Image (cartoon, rainbow, N blue to C red):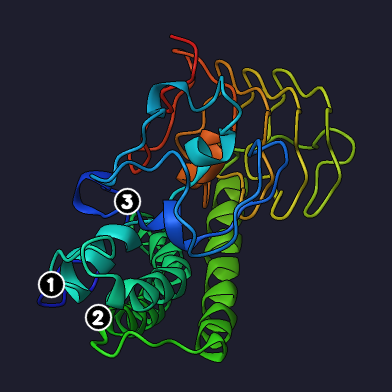
Amino acid sequence: MVSALPVPLPLASDCSACVGLCCAALPFQRSREFPESKPAEDPCRNLAPDARCTIHERLRPDGWVGCTEFECFGAGQWVTQHHFSGASWREDPSIASAMFEAFRALQPVHEMLFYLAQSMTIQLPDGLVGEIQHCEAELRMLSMNPMIRIEPSEILRARQTVRPLLDRVSKTVRGRARRAGHAPRTFPSGVRARSELMGTILTGADLRTADLRGALLMGADLDETRMTNTDLLGVDLRDASVRGTDLTGALFLTQPQLNSTIGDADTAIPEMLSRPGHWEQ
């Protein structure tokens, strides 16, 4: 079980409980993801006074792809509701910089908490479970800190603690599956961690237990592949096709990664994630 604290932390975004923090606090550059540039702490021109997006239904067609791919892992509503008691930076400009800084600091903390929560859904050795719970409790306390000023060095230290834990989770799960015969004998050429597989055709490949962490799979054809126990930590899946792909048991797949892919009604996804609205029905 995930370690319990008095106030449960959200690990998925709820825009209805936020005040448009991602639309104001973060910068973006003109690119595949955005049709124009914006500096940090300048509200997006599409952000309405009620903190809703005025072009929400047209984001992708109008070139605002990055908005549909972003995920704050619950940091937005946490900062708004827990740290600022529902106050809005629009109504009280004096708190704007503090809210924006808190959001930018806590988003990576909540992302790490998501990975740890995902790990806790897997059967793991008791010792490893204990280490994950301890790390998770420390991150939760960091997120609940009323001072909400988190130094970059604290984020770096947290990453240096979390990454080895995720590596051990991955090796434990993938090794167990291989010993049980739930993996192919070999993988297609180039399938390995941090590989450059942009546009590669892997249709129907059995990628169970493959270590793809940090790989570049932009625009790759992953239709109908099998990815049970495949390590997808940090994999760039932008515009990759996953039609008919089984992603239910993939390791460390996040909502932003899923949002950046092209799927359909036959794509199976993990329970912790939501089906992207732009996928084919």
Label 3 Cα neighbours within 10 Å, binned few <14 / some 14-19 / many ≥20: many
Q: Which residue is mark 3?
A: 12
Mark 3 to mark 1 CA distance (whole Å): 15 Å
* Left or right of residue 86: residue 179: right
Amino acid type, label 3: Ala
Q: Which residue is mark 1?
A: 7
x then y, percent, for residue 41 = 48, 64
* Left or right of residue 116: residue 59: right
x then y, percent, for residue 265 = 44, 13
Mark 2 to mark 1 CA distance (whole Å): 9 Å
Using the rendered image of the protein, determine whether residue 179 is visible from the camera's viewpoint: yes
Amino acid type, label 1: Val
- The answer to whether mark 3 and mark 1 are in CB contact below 8 A is no
- Residue 270 lies, with reference to residue 28, above or below; the image says above
- The answer to whether mark 3 and mark 2 are in CB contact below 8 A is no
Q: Mark 3 or mark 2, which has the lower sequence index? A: 3
- Residue 153 lies, with reference to residue 96, above or below; the image says below
Write the residue at 55% across / 16% down.
244
Amino acid type, label 2: Met
- Identify the image quadrant of residue 276: top left
Q: Which residue is mark 2?
A: 144
Q: Mark 3 or mark 1, which has the lower sequence index? A: 1
The quarter of the rendered structure image containing the C terminus is top left
Write the residue at 39% across / 66% down.
110
x then y, percent, for residue 192 = 80, 49
